[in-house]
Every structure is written in structure tokens, then in C-alpha cells.
């Protein structure tokens, strides 16, 4: 039993690193098995397919992050009927940082993997997240909408996806951004600092009064 668990963990560990670095489409099962030092039969035995492996990699993070984020949001909303949007975004920081305890550099890895899922049009992954974590997703959307009731639902859809794109791009290039900030401005940042820096920007984008669209 222990060896089976170890094999499964090695596959997941190897897969998440390769998926984050190369993307889902460019990472073959052969590459994963080589890095994990297992045979292809082991992948088929534990996961059945590459799609199921992708979902399992994300589930390790989502199973931890989603409930914690929802609990933090519920506690925040219970304290007041009028929560500023920036505070709603900020409450997600600690659940994100907790992922570093789950895996080394877990916060950055999770956001990079999530971004890959959207960039590479992994429809099955979006279906998986909606099906298994839809209640948590909807609670977050409802909390954001309650903080910005003046934004129509259709427009909120776009703005939240622009927000997601912003955080994904930022996390994908976080190491380079921190190096540039250190070299050019003598700033020392970590992942938490980067996330907290981007929150006011995302808040302003979601709350912007003008659509800026010609009709």
C-alpha cells in the first residue's frame, strides 16, 4: 500500500511541475513517467487518462483552497453587510498562501496551473472545476457582485475574467518581476507581496465606472 501511495504521489509531483512549466498540451505522459521514474502502466492504473491526471493535479490544491476561501469569505460577510471589494479580494490571500504548506511553492504553482487551464482551452478542466467546486465559485461571484451592485452581471463576467487573467499573468512572470524590482528599484518582494500589490489594481478594474466600449 505504501509503495502505491508513493508511486501516485511521485506521478502527481512530476506532472504538476511539468504542466506548470510546459503546459498541459506540451507535456506528454512519457515525459511525466520519465521524470517520476515510473512506467506508463502506473499512470493508467492510478489515473486512467491524461485528463484525469490533470484534474487530480488541480484537485490537490482546489480541495484545500476552495473550502478555506469560502470559509474566510463567509466570516467576512457575517461581520458586515457592506464589504469593500478590495477586502473581498484580500481575504483570499491567506488561503492562497496556505498552499505553500501543501507543496513547495504551492501558491505560485497552483495559480500557474489554473492559468494554463484557461489559456490552453482545457474545456474538461473548466467543467471539472465548475462541477466539483461550483458552489464555492458562485459564493465568490456573489460576494463580489454584492460589493459592486452597480456593475451588470454580463459586465461582471468579463471583468472577473480580466481579473483572473491579470493574476495568472502576474504569477506566471512573478520570479522575473521580483528580480527586475530588486535590480531596478532595490525592492525585495515575495509571492505574498506580489499578490497584495496586484489586488488594488484588480479592484480598480472591476469597479471602473465606464465600460469604455463604443456602442
Image (tube, rainbow, N blue to C red):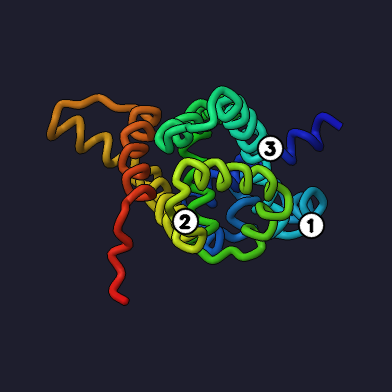
**Rendered-image quadrant of the C terminus:** bottom left
Q: Of the two numbered discs 3 and 2 on the same chain, state the one appearing first in sequence.
A: 3
Q: Distance between the residues labelled 3 and 2?
A: 26 Å
For label 3, the SS is: helix
Q: Which residue is drawn at 61% across and 50% down?
A: 34
| Location of mark 1 (residue) | 48
For label 2, the SS is: helix
Front disc: 1 or 3: 3
In front here: 109 or 90? 90
Please state the horizontal and vertical placement of residue 126, each as a whole percent of the image. Answer: 62, 58
Number of numbered markers: 3
| Location of mark 2 (residue) | 156
- Relative to 48, is 140 on the left or the right? left
Q: Residue at x 54, y 52 (%)?
A: 19
Mark yes or no: residue 45 visible. Answer: yes
Q: Residue at x 66, y 52 (%)?
A: 129
| Location of mark 3 (residue) | 63
Amino acid at each position: 500500500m505504501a509503495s502505491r501511495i508513493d508511486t501516485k504521489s511521485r506521478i502527481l509531483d512530476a506532472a504538476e511541475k511539468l504542466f506548470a512549466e510546459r503546459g498541459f498540451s506540451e507535456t506528454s505522459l512519457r515525459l511525466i513517467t520519465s521524470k517520476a521514474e515510473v512506467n506508463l502502466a502506473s499512470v493508467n492504473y492510478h489515473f486512467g487518462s491524461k485528463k484525469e491526471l490533470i484534474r487530480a493535479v488541480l484537485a490537490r490544491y482546489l480541495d484545500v483552497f476552495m473550502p478555506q476561501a469560502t470559509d474566510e469569505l463567509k466570516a467576512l460577510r457575517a461581520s458586515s453587510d457592506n464589504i469593500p471589494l478590495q477586502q473581498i479580494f484580500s481575504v483570499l490571500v491567506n488561503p492562497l498562501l496556505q498552499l505553500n504548506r501543501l507543496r513547495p511553492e504551492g501558491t505560485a504553482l497552483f495559480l500557474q496551473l489554473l492559468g494554463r487551464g484557461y489559456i490552453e482551452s482545457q474545456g474538461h478542466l473548466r467543467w471539472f472545476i465548475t462541477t466539483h467546486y461550483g458552489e464555492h465559485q458562485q459564493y465568490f461571484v456573489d460576494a463580489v457582485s454584492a460589493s459592486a451592485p452597480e456593475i451588470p452581471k454580463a459586465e461582471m463576467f468579463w471583468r472577473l475574467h480580466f481579473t483572473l487573467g491579470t493574476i495568472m499573468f502576474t504569477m506566471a512572470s512573478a520570479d522575473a518581476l521580483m528580480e527586475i524590482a530588486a535590480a531596478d528599484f532595490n525592492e525585495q518582494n515575495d509571492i505574498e507581496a506580489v499578490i497584495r500589490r496586484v489586488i488594488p489594481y484588480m479592484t480598480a478594474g472591476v469597479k471602473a465606472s465606464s465600460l469604455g466600449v463604443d456602442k
